[in-house]
Amino acid sequence: MKQNPAPLPGGKTAFPPARTALRDLYRAARHLPSTDPYAPARLARIVDQAEYFLQEWPLAEWPEALHSGQPLPDRHVLLSWLLTARREIIQAGVTAPGTMWPYARWHQITTTLLAALVPFA
């Protein structure tokens, strides 16, 4: 059964720590410039961390919506987008410091990753 986040006194909503971590990962990926010498490695790490938090989120506690009444996609949908981002990173090749991907590749991977994390923004 899906649950909605519990309201706290003062009108704020209580979310599980995984939601907060996924929001922080979204923000980190969104603000990571393509020219950063560690950008490919950081993107790969963000994908790893996001996958972990999504897999560890108890299915019984998966909310129907996070904010604004916008429905939250099923967990398997978000995980499939992360797996697509991971596959694109592997196809892009090296993620060692100083590696620069073509901007089009960077944009494709980042867009896929952000699509999986944007519900938590």
Image (tube, rainbow, N blue to C red):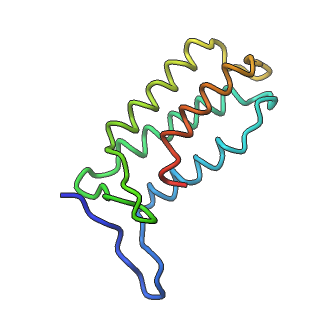
Quadrant into which the N terminus falls:
bottom left
Q: Residue at x 75, y 29 (%)?
A: 38
Quadrant into which the C terminus falls:
bottom right
Outermost residue toward the bottom? Answer: 10
Q: Quadrant of residue 69?
A: bottom left
State the residue in front, 43 or 76. 76
Q: Residue at x 33, y 43 (%)?
A: 75
Q: Residue at x 53, y 48 (%)?
A: 118
Q: Position of residue 30 (x, y in %)?
A: 67, 43
Q: Position of residue 57 (x, y in %)?
A: 34, 50
Looking at the picture, does residue 18 appear above or below residue 105? below
Q: Quadrant of residue 107?
A: top right
Looking at the picture, does residue 9 appear above or below residue 29? below
Q: Position of residue 31 (x, y in %)?
A: 72, 44
State the residue in front, 88 or 104. 104
Q: Is residue 12 left or right of residue 99?
A: left
Q: Quadrant of residue 62?
A: bottom left
State the residue in front, 48 or 64. 64
Count of numbered labels shown in the rendering: 0
Q: Position of residue 116 (x, y in %)?
A: 48, 40
Q: Is residue 89 left or right of residue 104?
A: left
Q: Residue at x 39, y 30 (%)?
A: 80
Outermost residue toward the left? Answer: 1
Looking at the picture, does residue 6 appear above or below residue 33? below
